[in-house]
Amino acid sequence: MSRIKKQERQQLLQQKLNTTPFVTDEELAIYFNVSVPTIRLDRLELGIPELRERIKSRVDGLTPSGNNHSHIEVVGELIDLTAGEQGLSILRTTDDMTDSSGYVEPQYLYAQADSLAKAVLGIPASLAGVGNIKYKNPVKADCNLVAKASVMRQRGEKYFIWVTIKDKVKEVFRAKFIMEPIQNRV
């Protein structure tokens, strides 16, 4: 992207953060071909909070539905949840999640997907009876992984859930789970 005027850049920045709210200042600086302090000044002028505050505001904006999901642990931070329909979580990868080659261990991606699927169902004691998973791209430390889970259909007590995890716009993991309450299996 070539140099653009401040007013136009700020308008584009507003649009970019409306479509992808979890992008960092560093990524925005590269995208707009300006310095990180310039992005921070633009955000301040527009009244847009930093990444951490944007995430917190999304979490605080969650409205509790009929069920209490606070007892269901989610790997990462729960950003959005519509019980029985869909959910969104974000996981910041760290160096302690990586293997000797520098890539994040796959169990972290699976744990994020599985825990989000359980949170969407609102059934803490649920079991993934069937899981079709694909690790699409390797992930390094210091990435924001955004997971989205959607209940595709229900057949009796079985729920068909589709989960995708993305790093920015690149899909890194996807899974199809068939989940059911654990008491059905005991």
Image (cartoon, grey):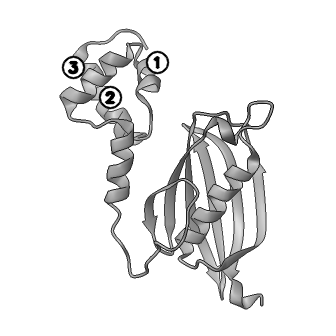
Residue where numbered disc 3 is placed: 7
In percent of width and height, residue 172 lies at 67, 43
Residue where numbered disc 2 is placed: 13
In the foreground, 46 or 12: 46
| Cβ atoms under marks 3 and 2 closer than 8 Å | no
Residue where numbered disc 1 is placed: 30
Mark 3–mark 1 Cα distance, whole angstroms, equals 18 Å
Indicate the quadrant where residue 169 lies.
Answer: top right
Q: Amino acid at mark 3?
A: Gln
**Which of the marked residues, 2 or 1, is nearer the chain's N terminus?**
2
In the foreground, 50 or 172: 50
| Cβ atoms under marks 3 and 1 closer than 8 Å | no
Q: Residue at x 72, y 90 (%)?
A: 184
Indicate the quadrant where residue 45 lies.
Answer: top left
Q: Residue at x 71, y 73 (%)?
A: 178
In percent of width and height, residue 91 lies at 55, 47
Does 131 sit above or below residue 102?
below
| Label 3 SS | helix
Which quadrant is the C terminus positioned in? bottom right
Regarding residue 88, the answer to whether it shows in the image is yes
